[in-house]
Each structure stands twice: as C-alpha cells, then as structure tokens.
Amino acid sequence: MPLRPTPGVPAPQDLASAADSVDTADTAHDLGAGPLPHAVFWDMDGTLVDTEPWWNESQRTLVEQDGGQWTTGLAHSLVGQALDHGARLLQEAGVTLGIGEIIERTMTDVTRAVRRSVPWRPGARELLTAVGQAGVPCALVTMSHAPLAAAFAESLPPGTFDFLVTGDMVLRGKPDPEPYTTALEVMARRHDDLDPAACVAVEDSLPGLLSAAGAGLATVAVPHVMTLPEDPRWEQWTTLAGRTPRHLGLVAARRSAAS
C-alpha cells in the first residue's frame, strides 16, 4: 500500500546489558570518535512520549460503559499493537462499537490530550534533538494513526522527522516487519548512501521490537509499561536519559559485528 502524505509533515518518496547510566563498555573509549547511525527510526507511544495513561483512560471508558471489565492484563495486551487488533481485543472485552468507531473514539481522545501537552519520556526529547543536530535523519514509525502522529510531530521543530509511517499507512502493523521495512525503503529513497546495517530502531514494546528486528534493524529496547525479554536481536537500555547519538551508532556497530 502506498504511503499517504501526513498533514504538516514532509511526504515519504555485543549487545550490551542495560544500565541506568551510560554503559561501561561505551565509556571505555572516546564516544566523540564513535560511529553515528545512518538513520534512527523512533516508535512514539511509550518510547518518546508517555501516552499510555491516556490510551488506557479512553479504552477503559469504552469497556466499562458497555458493561465489560477493564483489567491490567487487557491493558498490557494492547501495548504496541496495531489499532485494529487492539479494537478487536476491546470488542472481545465487551465493547459493542465497530472497529472503526473504537479507533476513531480513542484516537480523538489521545490526540486532544497531546495537543494540550506532550508527556515526554525521560531523556527522549534530548536524544531526539541531539540526533537531529548530529545530522542523522529520523523517521517516526508508530501504530498510532496519522492524526495523532501529526499532532505530535507538529509540536516539534520543522524537519525533526523526515517522514512518518503510521498504522493507517500499512497493511500489516507491528509485530509484522512491514512498518519498518516500509520506513527503510522510504529512507533509502531519500538518502542514497543509506546503509540499513547502520540504522537503529528505538522501541518500548515487544510487538515493536519484533517488527524492527524482523526488518533486520539494530534495535534498542527501552522498557516502559512492561518488562521486555532479553534477546540477542535487541539491546536493552533502562532509560534514554544520558544517551547520545554515538551510543545509538554503537548499537548498530555491535549488531553488525555480531551478524
């Protein structure tokens, strides 16, 4: 499916253990001389911004107004999933609205909240800004649909993201690799010298990690709502705070060396 333009955004054409501070292995040499990634692909909800409480509030209202029971297990099952899959889970929990209506209702609620205030995750804004200042292109790869992704992107300086890949632009959402293979293809068209092995994805959920790793990307896992499994396909960080573009570049370098 071809990418659709997103309002307000340009159209698209080792393995170290986690630590609260910068890894000892990374500080053992001059990070200023370390590699930069060729591109960084960012998840949005839970990775850059803490929108999960707003999603939960909207989804819980839908479940309870139709007589269903909202549980922690249900909330966790929705994290990182494509919105149509999440809508089906909500229907199984008792919501009587159609899938499109569920998506529209919850998206409207969360978009309205983001337009009021952007709830950044620790270190996320600083690292995103530093990556841009280093001249590394970025793209947003999110299962949220275009209106919410655009509301977030429009809160940032123009050009922060080269383009957006949103859940309504792909046939198969995370955990399928399609969102990230799509993002890689678009980024390669925009940057002739792009080396996919030098690109990095940043994710907070298991569906997102499986999607990015399935696309062959070096991947950083930053757990938020749920604990994430250790896996050689990704490197876990407990936080983005204190991280630099060079740390992202080292993730790609370690992944490439281990392949």
Image: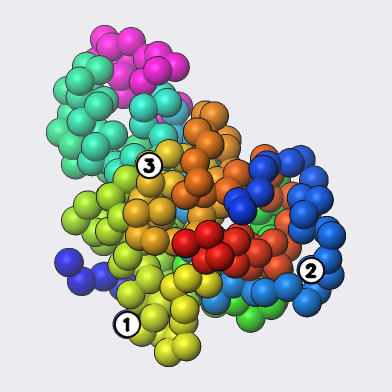
* Rendered residue at 33%/75% (across/down): 185
Mark positioned earlier in the residue sequence (3 or 2): 2
Distance from the alpha carbon under mark 2 to that under mark 1: 33 Å
| Residue type indicated by callout 3 | Pro
Q: Which residue is mark 3?
A: 207
Left/right placement of residue 186 relative to residue 251 reads left
Q: Point out the frontmost of discs 3 and 1.
A: 3
Q: Position of residue 116 (x, y in %)?
A: 57, 48
Quick check: is 71 in the magenta stretch? yes
Left/right placement of residue 251 relative to residue 94 reads right
* Rendered residue at 50%/33% (across/down): 229
Which dot marks residue 13?
Answer: 1
Q: Which residue is mark 2?
A: 31
Q: Residue furthest front?
A: 258
Q: Position of residue 183 (x, y in %)?
A: 37, 68
Q: How many marks?
A: 3
Q: Position of residue 245 (x, y in %)?
A: 68, 67
Q: Residues within 10 Å of mark 3 (few under 14, many from 20)?
A: some
Mark positioned earlier in the residue sequence (3 or 1): 1
* Rendered residue at 19%/41% (across/down): 100
Distance from the alpha carbon under mark 3 to that under mark 2: 31 Å
| Residue type indicated by callout 2 | Leu
Residues shaded magenta? 57-74
